[in-house]
Image (spheres, helix red, strand yellow):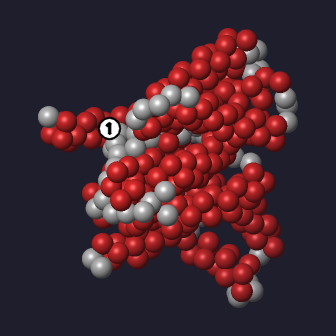
Amino acid sequence: MKRFGIFPLLSCLLVVIAACSLAMGKYPLPLREIIGFISFKALNVGQMDHDRLQMLDNLLLHIRLPRVLAALLIGASLSVSGAAFQAMFINPLVSPGLLGVLAGASFGAALGMIFSKSWIAVQASSFLFGFIAVIIAVGIAKMHKGNTLLLLVLGGVISAALFTSLLSIIKYLADPYNQLPEIVRWLMGDLSFMDRRTLFLTAGPQAAIICAIALLSGYLNALSMGDEEARSLGVPVETMRFLLIFLATVISAMTVVLAGMIGWVGLIIPHIARMLVGPDNKVLIPASALIGAIYLIIVDDVSRLMFNVEVPMGITTSLVGIPFFAFILRKARKGWN
């Protein structure tokens, strides 16, 4: 029960940080005014000047709130996906990009930017090629007999290398003045790309898949003990592994659709959650979702406010993730030795 006691604290912290994020920006707002605006809009309580109401409506509901929700969803999705992959592959150093989904989605987005001016086409292409990359990785693993986990990793390496090479070709062919800067910014990961319509279309599926992975966390516990132990417990190993890979892939691809490439989140957040609640995936998965959401909202605020210009979020997550990864390697050496 002690492990579950952290969830009310994390939930309250998430609400507080989200509220503070709504207040912060180029035009800071007092929390009192935000609460008054919400009370007026939701409950019709109090009074507010019409011009001020219009300004707050545009600033909060059309700009800041969608951005906070996007950061929340992306952070939770990448963290849950990373925790699921680490459990399935029995390896604390894997991340959501293991099977090539992020490389494929990035190539798809760049391809869409070259051949279409429609942002919907760019996002659809990103999602499609993310899936194709994983299908290639799984297909390569299925073509050979042997250790399934090892073959999946090798398939992912091949798939990621393929789409990274194709992405390099796209960047080489892109217009250096009109197309290449947009592609490069996308690859850095940036919520300024976020489209409200896409957010509202993906929010429901992302939340549902996070809940589904949490409900299947008992199977993750079994898979993390190895195939033989899982089979002895009556777990359909291949079916559950590929179902969980499918779910984790979907939410990873959706994050690229929303904001481009945001690295390191799916690697470091599950470790932080594991330090707090232990390795049981029934607790680890929801803890990863909450911590990931909190983390990425904070990262977005830092990216927006620390410098005179907005820094792409992927740069900030990398600056934080690299030293933390070095710390993980140092801790992991004891186990390897």
Residue 101 image position (x, y, % from top left):
58, 36
**Corner quadrant of residue 73:** bottom right
Helix or strand or loop: what does disc 1 sit on?
A: helix
Q: Is residue 55 above or below residue 165?
A: below
Q: Quadrant of the N terminus?
A: bottom left
For mark 1, does the 10 Å Cα neighbourhood hold few (<14), some (14 to 19), or many (20 or more) residues?
some
Of residues 273 and 30, the one drawn nearer to the viewer in this rendering: 273
**Corner quadrant of residue 288:** bottom left
Of residues 162 and 230, the one drawn nearer to the viewer in this rendering: 230
**Residue drawn 74% across and 78% down?**
41
Viewer can see residue 1: yes
Of residues 107 and 320, the one drawn nearer to the viewer in this rendering: 107
- The residue under label 1 is which amino acid type? Phe
Residue assigned mark 1: 325
Viewer can see residue 269: no
**Residue drawn 32% across and 37% down?**
325
Residue 50 image position (x, y, % from top left):
81, 73
**Residue drawn 71% across and 86% down?**
43
